[in-house]
Image (spheres, rainbow, N blue to C red):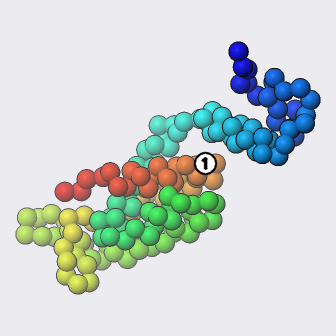
Amino acid sequence: MVDYSFRVFGIFCVNSTTVGINLNSKRIENYKYMLRQHHIMQQKQLSDEEWSVAREIARMLRFFIELGNYGYVDRLSNTYNIEIVERTIYEALRESKASMSYIRTNDEGKKVYVDSKGKVYNITPYIPPSNIIQKFLDSAAKDLRICRIASALAFTYITR
């Protein structure tokens, strides 16, 4: 029976059945990869509050998806550092705020967004409260997965 458990000794990753530390670099890279995957699986799940925050950000991003502007969502889902997240959220908030002036009330009494070309959308821009933005940025600084989750959730919101 083969033992697939791994041990970390200093900077070397070795299989517990390996005698000595005469591993080639390819094998060491495989062990490092497996340890990273194990670490990823052991990471804590998002708390209920983090899920709530992600849903609020997704609600803001949904407006841009409806308009066919996927730039903010793509940048958040593919981000690799917090500066990109901060910049993307800032730009999305700025555009949401600017879009507020294009909200109209249709014949049925519902609020709609009318773009500069006159096209009517059954969605209006949404700006989350500042405490939600702060919690999102704090969570993203700890774990960027929340950005991908918010981006994925944005595609699932039904606005009609």
The residue at the far left in this view is 107
Residue 41 position (above or below residue 144): above
Decide if residue 127 is on the left or right side of residue 159: right
x then y, percent, for residue 70: 40, 68
Q: Please provide percent x and percent y for residue 82.
A: 62, 60
Graded by Cα atoms within 10 Å as few (under 14), some (14 to 19) or many (20 or more), the crowding at tag 1 reads some
Residue 131 at least partly seen: no
Is residue 1 found left or right of 102 in the rendered image?
right
Residue at screen point 51% across, 37% down: 47
The spot of residue 91 in percent (x, y) is 49, 72
Measuring 71% from the left and 24% from the top, which residue is drawn there?
4
Name the residue that disc number 1 marks: 143
In the image, taking residue 55 as reference, residue 146 lies left or right, namely right
Of the pair 64 and 4, the residue shown nearer to us = 4
Give SS at disc 1.
loop
User: Taking 34 as reference, is 106 left or right?
Assistant: left
The image quadrant where one finds the N terminus is top right
**Amino acid type of the residue tagged 1 in the rendering:** Asp
Q: Residue at x 47, y 49 (%)?
A: 149
Give percent across and percent down for residue 127.
39, 62
| Quarter of the rendering containing residue 84 | bottom right
Q: Tell me the residue at 86%/38% (across/down).
A: 23
* Residue 33 visible in the displayed image: yes
Q: Nearer the viewer, residue 113 or 18?
A: 18
- In the foreground, 88 or 30: 30
Q: Count the marks: how many?
A: 1
Taking 97 as reference, is 126 above or below it?
Answer: above
Quarter of the image where the C terminus is located: bottom left
